[in-house]
Image (spheres, rainbow, N blue to C red):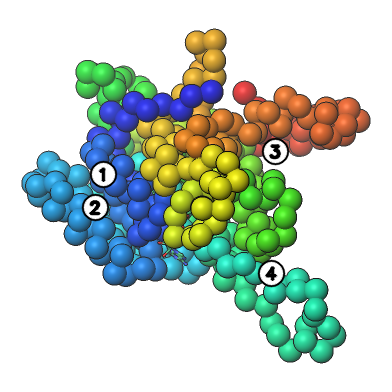
Amino acid sequence: MSISTDFADLRDKVVVLTGGASGIGASTVRLFHSHGAHVVFGDLALEAGSALVASLSTSSPTSSASPKVTFVPTNTAIHADVVRLFKTALALHGRVDHAVACAGVLTPGADFFALDQNVKSVELNEPDTTTLDVNLKGSMYFARVALVYLRHVPAQENADPAEVQRDGNDGRRLEGAEIDRSLTLIASDMPFIGVAQAPVYQVSKMGVLELMRVLRPLFQSPLSGQCLSPNGQGERRPKIQIRVNAVCPSLAATPMVGGLSEAWQGAGLPINTPEMVGQVILGLAACPESAVGGGNTKKAHGMALEVVGGEAWDIEEGLESSMGTWLGERGRQTVLGARQLFKGMGERVWEAP
Ligand SMILES: NC(=O)c1ccc[n+]([C@@H]2O[C@H](COP(=O)([O-])OP(=O)(O)OC[C@H]3O[C@@H](n4cnc5c(N)ncnc54)[C@H](O)[C@@H]3O)[C@@H](O)[C@H]2O)c1
């Protein structure tokens, strides 16, 4: 499967991102900016966030036509901070096209389940839950707010939906086209390795993968945009397709993993650069369709992309097609039956492409 590297459609798009001051997030901010998107990013790291904005404003001459990068001090584990981040983007640019939840922390967390714990110490030492708060709760807050702002339609889009959808090649208007928007979550392939090296981190990242899974059936089909204008009654509501995906990078050489990069490469394992992961994130935002081989494409929605040495493929596709092997035939039949049952009850059920 290949992810698009044609990023022409990103010009003038508005991107909201967390964790943009370092590593994968910072590379992704630079990449979006270099392809003409406006980026509003949040992070806890005030100095690094401001320095990134300064470096990008000196690298491209400031003119009304150049893409704008804005840093908003944000703690993604605080709901009001996440709302402020999106509010800033809306106030500056009038809409949000793509959202990327990249902020994360990796504290070893081994003491959470320390084997030398006893009945006294387990009572006295409350565990540190920062990793859960940032990685899992923070991603859930981000997704919650993002999915509202991604559906928000400014008054001018409401007046003429065709105005805002243009053909990627020549700028022609596409009459009646859906507006394409996306949310990308960052999980990890760490939970698949089977060590307990960073238990809290691993649990948080498995939670992020499940977050993508619970959201994908909700946004399987286009939804009507929402408008807050007081005279919104009777206005046209363009259809909006929000695509939700997860990226599960294998090791990437960033400050988060420190010296593990050398040991990883020493063991002959392929490593990602932060830019490689950033390219995959851009591909998901830029291209509503992914190539799946044989000249076919599928909607880039509901995927969990493993990224190894810059190559990406969809884990979910393999899980779905091999369900009888890993769940057993009886388990597979039960899952398929349960999907039908819930569908009959009027629930939105994920339909794998
Ligand atoms: N590096 C890897 O090997 C790897 C592999 C898989 C997944 N990931 C994930 O990729 C994402 C980016 O990680 P990275 O490797 O670039 O690490 P990084 O440490 O270089 O960057 C993480 C950024 O998140 C910010 N951040 C931390 N807590 C925050 C909070 N509460 N609110 C806002 N911002 C906060 C940090 O200040 C930092 O700028 C993380 O979600 C991480 O779990 C990384």
Residues at discs 2 and 3 in contact (Cβ within 8 Å): no
Q: Distance between the residues labelled 1 and 4?
A: 38 Å
Pointers 1 and 4 in contact (CB under 8 A)? Answer: no
Location of mark 1 (residue): 33
Q: First in sequence: mark 3 or mark 1?
A: 1
Say whether mark 4 is within 8 Å of ligand 1: no
> What residue type is disc 3 on?
Glu
What is the quadrant of residue 49 in the picture?
bottom left
Q: Which residue is drawn at 37% across and 28% down?
A: 5
Q: What residue is shown with label 2? A: 69
In the image, residue 225 lies at what x, y percent?
Answer: 41, 39
Q: Quadrant of residue 48?
A: bottom left
Give the alpha-carbon distance from disc 4 to disc 2, as whole Å.
38 Å
**What residue is shown with label 3?**
347
Residue kind at label 2, given as amino acid type: Val
C-alpha span from label 2 to label 1: 7 Å
Give the residue displayed 41% in from the left and 26% down from the top.
4
Q: Earlier in the sequence, mark 2 or mark 3?
A: 2
Marked residue nearer the N-terminal end (2 or 1): 1
From what the image shows, is residue 101 above or below residue 137?
A: above
Between 314 and 110, which is closer to the camera in this rendering?
110
Residue carrying label 4: 110
**SS category of the residue bearing label 3:** loop
Q: In this view, does 104 lie to the left or right of 225?
A: right
| Place of residue 266 in the rendered image (x, y in percent of width and height, measured from the top left) | 56, 48
Q: In which quarter of the image is the C terminus?
A: top right
- Nearest the camera: 177 or 58? 58
How far apart are the two marked residues, 3 and 4, measured between alpha carbons?
Answer: 39 Å
- Closer to the chain start, of discs 3 and 4, is 4
Q: Quadrant of residue 36?
A: top left
